Image (cartoon, rainbow, N blue to C red):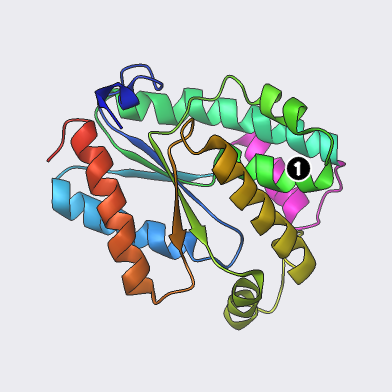
Amino acid sequence: MGKEGCRDAGDATAPFIVIEGIDGAGKTTQMKRLHQWMEARYGRPVLTTGEPTNRPIGRLLKDALQRRVELDGICHALLFAADRIDHVKSEIESSIHRGIPVLCDRYFLSSFAYQWREMPGELDWIESINARAIHPHLTLLIDAPAEVCMDRIRQARSDTELFENLETLRAIRGNYLELAHRRKTLDRIEIIDGARAPDEVQAEVRDRVEKVMQTCGDG
């Protein structure tokens, strides 16, 4: 990745890094640990955020994911795209242009992976409604078998959300891996084995992030 890697986000002075993966892969745990390490390592604030957001559109989406509101696939896709643009304009762009690195738990790769399963013939359309979303400087896909992820979910809590069943997780994991192959260069996607011990995963996460921080001018 050359220095031009920072220009997709409008010549940002700090990186925009996304953590992706199916539910139970460990992405949220890894992001929390990465956040603490980055602030200590680089001596400046790092913004953590995620999607769906806590803004008005994101709150509606969270209600749908928790089965409090019923929405069809097209409504889901359009609302996620709208929430994402609002997220970029209200929070992400302003932070990276002020020199504050951003860590985001899920971004448009999640929409592509999940919505592609719901609407298998509509990937081009799903990508088109997200065309105005900026590209991350790095996307880390924490990958683990669906069986491992489902076991982790069951151990962590008794309730499940809309997409948290074994068949769905298998399908979405397959979509993630296919998309990572197709979009590896465009979205700077790196796949990390999330079935290992958390410390091993975190070590690799930090290594990938350090390289991006150097690209954007940090040592």
Quadrant position of residue 124: top right
Q: Position of residue 22 (x, y in %)?
A: 61, 59
Is residue 134 covered in magenta?
A: no
Residue 51 is at least partly visible in this image:
no
Please name the residue that numbered disc 1 is placed on: 116
Horizontal side of residue 14 vs 73, given as left or right: left
Q: Residue type at mark 1: give it.
A: Trp
Q: Secondary structure at mark 1?
A: helix
Quadrant position of residue 21: bottom right
Q: Relative to 44, does residue 165 appear above or below in the rendering?
A: below
Residue 196 is at least partly visible in this image:
yes
Q: Position of residue 105 (x, y in %)?
A: 49, 49
User: For the C terminus, which image quadrant?
Assistant: top left
Horizontal side of residue 153 vs 30, given as left or right: right
Per the rendered image, the range of residues in magenta is 51-72
Quadrant position of residue 183: top right
Q: Nearer the viewer, residue 87 or 118?
A: 118
Residue ID at (58%, 31%): 84
> Residue at the front extreme?
181
Is residue 60 covered in magenta?
A: yes
User: For the N terminus, which image quadrant?
Assistant: top left
Horizontal side of residue 73 vs 145, given as left or right: right
